Image: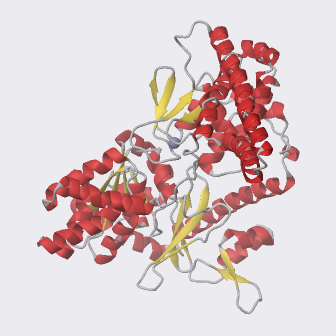
Amino acid sequence: MTIPEEKISEILNTSDIVDIVSESVILKKSGRNFFGLCPFHSEKSPSFSVNADKQIFHCFGCSAGGNALSFVMKYHGISFPEAVRMLARKYNIVLETELIDPARRKQVLVKESLFRLNKKVMILYAGFLSDSSQGGAARRYLERRGMTGDIIDEFYLGVAHDTWDDAVHFLKKEKVTRQIAANSGLILPRKQGNGYYDRFRNRIIFPIFDINMQVAGFGGRVMDDAMPKYMNSPETPVYSKSRILYGLHAAKQHCRQEGVVYIVEGYFDFLSLYQHGVKNTVASLGTALTQEHVRILKGYAAKMILVFDSDDAGIKAAKRSIQIFMQEAVDTRILVLPDKNDPDSFVMKHGKDSFLALAADAKTIMQFLLGLAMDTHGLSVEGRVRILDEMKQHLALIQDSALRSLYVRELSETLNIDERAVLEKVRDAVVQKNTKQSPLMADHPMDKEILVSDPRERQILSIMLNYPNLIPEVIEKDVLSCFYSKRFQAIAGKIIATKSVNEGFVTNVMAKIDDNRDQELIASLAMDDFSGNDDMAKTANVLMNRIIRIRKKNENILTTKIISAEKGCDANVTDLLRKKQLEIQQLHDSQQL
Ligand SMILES: [Zn+2]
């Protein structure tokens, strides 16, 4: 990392974490903190908190935490230098690009070049469509599909002609480097090895925007029955299928207003709904929805409605997507459209109000799955047992236990099977799923005893962070040398090394920490609430004395044991105890708090 610490501090002190997090998480103020649904783990009630004074975030559920930079990194899946650049740009802080590590800098430049190129190519294809002499057939096709001029303009639809080299020529004319051209996904190398040809030919072109309105990639659809019907850009440095949802850039504000997002499959499904005023919609573009997709959407709406065709392919797609939504504990509904309609044809025929009326009756995931299972197995005694066997697998995926027991009740009532019996089946399935168990040394009483001192070490760190004026006492007592946790010791060292004790102390400590886990720890410490304690100095003293005392006592016990084992010439026991000493150390270092 070559970005100077002062620059990072400047960015952290200028940026506002509430502002930054709000772009992707719905936050509500409660007391001194803001709360929202964590974008990093599945949850139904908000345990993700942001503190504006300390400029940190912390999740009480999964203990993700950190500052504005770590949030941006984690949320967008980008590197530290990229996050620095992103915030610097947002807050108009000048950053010497030379300071960034050259390899990373190159990556950033490649991405920027690709975005620039994609935008130009988007304008090229849109130009082809509006060209009166060339774009006629494509315009008539879009008209037949009911697309208005406004929609075509707003989403920059275009057309690729039935040629092999429009894009190739354009890239040449624009003097695009070989590397960028190859990375763009717009052209493909000829099999004979002599040059390139266009990926998109004789297709309607749908530019795919990322959340920041940058053109990440393209989709193309044929205007007749040729195959493949749809074709999308391949994965490129700026186009990641597991993250991008078509239309989210335009839909996001509407999703927030409505608190609901409709998820459809295709471009025309999206565009038709949007055109008819159902603007809180995104399209998955036929790729299976990922956990990332769902987590991104959670930042815009608490409720998600999956809209599917009623044909077999639609039902299959629904079943495939559902697992992800269950794992993420999102309030999800399944809307299967009647009479072989897709969302496009339905809203074109019946209009917005009919669509919304159907959506209001959309099934919950369990109702939907149960319906399918009942259709397959019937409600005979044997059928009901089969249904239960099938449903328990689905239920085991739900992490939220309150939600799970709700579904268990629903299932037991529908199948008329005793609730306890259902619960037992589901529990078995859950156990099978979580076969991995952490090898905690809980059955060794001595370790437990020593672990008791651990929370105190954490508390000392917390006091140092929240009451920097008490740090001199900590140094004087030399309590850090009695810490079992080397990790806590190192963090305490960094807290001590942080200068400005007044304004933005936590921010400045954070700027010194590069380890993600340590950042999370600092964020969780900074969230500690000491209100009600009017003598922190005294509390600190008591804690420090105990830590020192316990360390000495434990050391005496262990030493005595080692000595007596050595006396009895029991080499095994001696080894074991020495190992224990080491393990205790490691255990403390690896403890998640
Ligand atoms: Zn979380």
Q: Is residue 97 left or right of residue 19?
A: right
Residue 568, position in %: x, y?
A: 76, 46
**Quadrant assignment, res 307:** bottom left
Q: Residue furthest bottom?
A: 192
Residue 96, position in %: x, y?
A: 85, 41
The residue that appears at 23% across and 64% down in the rendered structure is 370
Residue 22, position in %: x, y?
A: 52, 36
**Quadrant assignment, res 188:** bottom right
Q: 344 and 551: which one is in front?
A: 551
**Quadrant assignment, res 275:** bottom left
Q: 161 and 136: which one is in front?
A: 161
Q: Residue furthest top?
A: 534
Evaluate whether residue 514 shows in this view.
no
Say if 88 sits above or below 122 in the image.
above
The residue that appears at 11% across and 73% down in the rendered structure is 380
**Image color mode:** secondary structure
Image quarter of the C terminus: top right
Q: Is residue 540 left or right of residue 156?
A: right
Q: Is residue 564 left or right of residue 209?
A: right
Say if 65 sits above or below 289 in the image.
above
Image quarter of the N terminus: top right
Q: 477 and 165: which one is in front?
A: 477
Residue 457, position in %: x, y?
A: 67, 27
Evaluate whether residue 402 shows in this view.
yes
Q: Residue furthest front?
A: 568
